[in-house]
Image (spheres, helix red, strand yellow):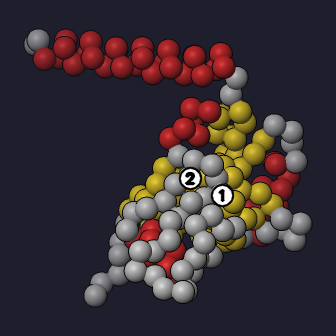
């Protein structure tokens, strides 16, 4: 059987881009058990309450990401919200440590996907938005949608 190619998205944290300004992003591998991988292949995961943090031993961990138990699993099944280690190189970890020491910045998971058959997570360095920032985001999205609608109607009328 040929190896899987390309990217297959499992879960995206759409609310993260609404609630936070994303400053920087990284792609990281994850240390998973067999039943977690099987559950992800079924396309079931939730990133809504998840966050990442640097442990005291210069390792990055992913917390509160919900990967449900594998339905066919036995006593070897995993717990749904366990802490998972992220696989990053030393340079990336030191940059993350330096940037998360700044107040108001946090690491959040943005998406979970398979890339060439390997489970990856995209984590982002984020700063929380204020309510007026969120209103500006909604207004910009609505105006962009209205402009696109007008352009389609104009091009269709030709």
Give the quadrant of residue 152. Answer: top left
The picture places residue 116, in percent across and down from the top left corner, at: 42, 72
The picture places residue 118, in percent across and down from the top left corner, at: 48, 74
Name the element at disc 1: loop
Give the quadrant of residue 72. Answer: bottom left
Q: Give the quadrant of the C terminus.
A: top left
Q: Residue at the spot x=50%, y=66% of the render?
A: 68
Specify which label sits upstream in the sequence, 1 or 2.
Answer: 2
Is 43 positioned to the left or the right of 89 in the image?
Answer: left
| Within-10-Å neighbours for mark 1: few <14, some 14–19, many 20+ | some
Is 36 positioned to the left or the right of 88 in the image?
Answer: left
Q: Residue at the spot x=11%, y=12% of the render?
A: 157
The correct choice, above or below, for 101 with respect to 66 in the image is above
The picture places residue 104, in percent across and down from the top left corner, at: 81, 37
Tag 1 residue: 64
Tag 2 residue: 47
Name the element at disc 2: loop
Front residue of 70/42: it is: 70
The correct choice, above or below, for 17 with respect to 146 in the image is below
The correct choice, above or below, for 43 with respect to 34 in the image is above
Residue 16 at least partly seen: yes
In the image, farthest residue toward the left: 158
Front residue of 15/72: it is: 72
Asked if disc 1 and disc 2 are in contact, CB closer than 8 Å, the reply is no
Residue 52: numbered disc: none
Q: Residue at the spot x=48%, y=85% of the render?
A: 74
| Within-10-Å neighbours for mark 2: few <14, some 14–19, many 20+ | many
Residue 123 at least partly seen: no
Query: In 3D space, how far apart are the residues under numbered discs 1 and 2 (Cα atoms)?
Result: 8 Å
């Amino acid at each position: 059987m040929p190896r899987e190619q390309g990217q297959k998205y499992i879960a995206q944290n759409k609310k993260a881009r609404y609630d936070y300004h994303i400053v920087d992003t990284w792609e990281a591998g994850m240390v998973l058990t067999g039943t977690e991988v099987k559950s992800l292949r079924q396309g079931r995961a939730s990133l809504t309450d998840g966050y990442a943090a640097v442990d005291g031993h210069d390792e990055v961990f992913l917390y509160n990401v919900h990967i449900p138990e594998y339905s066919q699993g036995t006593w070897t099944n995993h717990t749904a919200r366990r802490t998972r280690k992220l696989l990053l190189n030393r340079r990336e970890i030191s940059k993350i440590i330096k940037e998360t020491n700044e107040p108001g910045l946090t690491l959040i998971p943005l998406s979970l996907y398979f890339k060439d058959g390997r489970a990856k997570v995209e984590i982002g360095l984020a700063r929380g938005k204020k309510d007026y920032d969120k209103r500006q985001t909604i207004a910009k999205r609505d105006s962009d949608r209205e402009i696109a609608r007008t352009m389609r109607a104009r091009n269709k009328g030709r």
